[in-house]
């Protein structure tokens, strides 16, 4: 009985703490998106799904670009119901397969007439290999989005002002891009201990930030702008493929210190919607605020080299 009481108090305290202290800033833009088309990768769960619901409520035509037809179609029903919009579409996209990325882009460009917002949100936290033999986190988090963005750039340019939003992470601070390792292993690191996975994930997130930096330079003079961001530490499905011990250790953090997925979507929404941030193209945001990057995360030479290597890895060069 008293144990239940204590448990109840802890849960209520955690709830209040999270909704006041952990919450962070919210996107305040009132922008409506009627007549606009948006793609969100990995939008069947987590912050991608909350982003989809918000943008659908604003009137956008929302393309849920997800790898599993079953999970994507289930999310489609949820997003339609929660947004009250029927302008929501599922299209299959597996970022771990360049064939799938190309086929998604082809279908999209054929069946849809616009693209105003591309939200590169999907991410994995797991070792393994993609269909193309790349390291899983490098292949999905970076290369898949690199190829997708490049295949859709002409459409974005034709629909300007338009935006690309790259969901990175503050873990990019601990990342590095080891080009020798990339050349030999087509991965950003080997090993599969819990610590290895963290480093390799951080490396892939540094790629997101460097990609965004180089993309902004290449988009100068167009009406397309791009932004990278840290969404916060969020209670989502991201850790689903880690050990059960690791997941257990996340429970108290989830309860007290991690944002929920609605809170976690706010910086993505800010970068997608906020009026007047176009001069900040190429920059990095956190808590709905632009942040300085360490020199390593906006290194011109590294971002150019990564771009050229990425082009070769997906047959664009
Ligand atoms: N959670 C955090 O604390 C945190 C912190 C910083 C940054 N982030 C970043 O935020 C983004 C969203 O993560 P989340 O926390 O919302 O995680 P999540 O709940 O695990 O959602 C990730 C989404 O990515 C999709 N995905 C994974 N592999 C894919 C592939 N090969 N092709 C297409 N889609 C794929 C997943 O689809 P399935 O359901 O089919 O697997 C899922 O829809 C990620 O880029 C992540 O790195 C998260
Ligand atoms: C986010 O910004 C708000 C408003 O500026 C501030 O009160 C809050 O402490 C910030 N949160 C984090 C985690 O930086
Ligand atoms: C950008 O958009 C503005 C406003 O719609 C337009 O006047 C301008 O011509 C566009 N510029 C380019 C390079 O497309
Ligand atoms: C990752 O976790 C999900 C959910 O628990 C599971 O369905 C999937 O098979 C796992 N993938 C791998 C490669 O372990």
Image (spheres, rainbow, N blue to C red):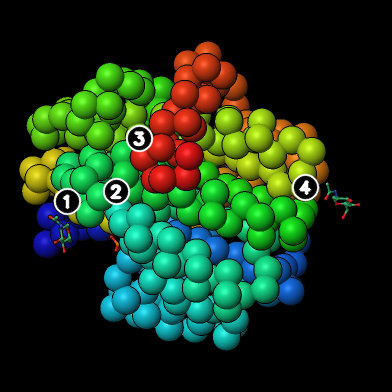
State the CA–CA distance, disc 3 to disc 2: 10 Å
State the CA–CA distance, disc 2 to disc 4: 31 Å
Q: Depth check: 134 or 257 in front? A: 134
State the CA–CA distance, disc 4 to disc 3: 27 Å
Disc with the residue nearer the chain's start (4 vs 1)? 4
State the CA–CA distance, disc 3 to disc 1: 17 Å
**Disc marking residue 124:** 2
Disc with the residue nearer the chain's start (1 vs 2)? 2
Residues tagged 2 and 4 counted as in contact (Cβ below 8 A): no
Label 3 belongs to which residue? 204
Q: Nearer the viewer, mark 3 or mark 1?
A: 3
**Disc marking residue 223:** 4
Disc with the residue nearer the chain's start (3 vs 2)? 2
Q: Residue at x 20, y 31 (%)?
A: 185
State the CA–CA distance, disc 1 to disc 2: 9 Å
For label 2, being within 8 Å of ligand 1 is answered yes
Residue 76 spot, x, y in % from top left: 43, 79
For label 1, being within 8 Å of ligand 4 is answered yes
Q: In the rendered view, does 267 fall on the left or right side of 170?
A: right
Q: Depth check: 284 or 187 in front? A: 187
- Density class for disc 4 (Cα within 10 Å; few <14, some 14-19, many ≥20) is some
- Density class for disc 1 (Cα within 10 Å; few <14, some 14-19, many ≥20) is few
Q: Residue at x 27, y 26 (%)?
A: 183
Q: Residue at x 25, y 33 (%)?
A: 187
């Amino acid at each position: 009985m008293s144990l239940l009481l204590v448990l109840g108090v802890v849960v209520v305290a955690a709830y209040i703490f999270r909704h006041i202290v952990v919450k962070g800033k919210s996107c305040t833009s009132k922008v409506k998106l009627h007549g606009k088309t948006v793609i969100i990768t990995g939008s069947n769960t987590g912050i991608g799904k909350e982003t989809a619901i918000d943008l659908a409520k604003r009137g956008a035509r929302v393309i849920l670009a997800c790898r599993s037809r079953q999970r994507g179609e289930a999310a489609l029903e949820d997003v339609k119901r929660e947004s009250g919009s029927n302008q929501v579409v599922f299209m299959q996209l597996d970022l771990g397969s360049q064939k799938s990325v190309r086929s998604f882009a082809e279908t999209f460009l054929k069946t849809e007439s616009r693209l105003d917002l591309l939200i590169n949100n999907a991410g994995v936290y797991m070792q393994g290999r993609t269909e193309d033999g790349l390291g899983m986190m490098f292949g999905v988090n970076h290369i898949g989005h690199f190829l997708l963005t490049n295949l859709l750039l002409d459409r974005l340019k034709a629909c300007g002002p338009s935006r690309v939003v790259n969901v990175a992470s503050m873990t990019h601070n601990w990342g590095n891009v080891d080009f020798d390792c990339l050349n030999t292993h087509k991965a950003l690191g080997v090993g599969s201990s819990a610590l290895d996975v963290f480093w390799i994930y951080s490396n892939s997130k540094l790629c997101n930030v460097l990609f965004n930096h180089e993309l902004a330079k290449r988009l100068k003079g167009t009406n397309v702008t791009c932004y990278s961001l840290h969404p916060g530490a969020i209670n989502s499905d991201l850790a689903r493929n880690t050990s059960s011990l690791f997941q257990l250790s996340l429970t108290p953090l989830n309860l007290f210190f991690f944002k929920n997925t609605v809170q976690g979507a706010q910086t993505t929404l800010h970068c997608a919607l906020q009026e007047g941030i176009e001069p900040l193209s190429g920059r990095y945001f956190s808590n709905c605020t632009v942040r300085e990057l360490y020199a390593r995360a906006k290194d011109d030479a590294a971002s150019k080299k990564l771009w050229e290597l990425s082009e070769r890895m997906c047959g664009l060069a």
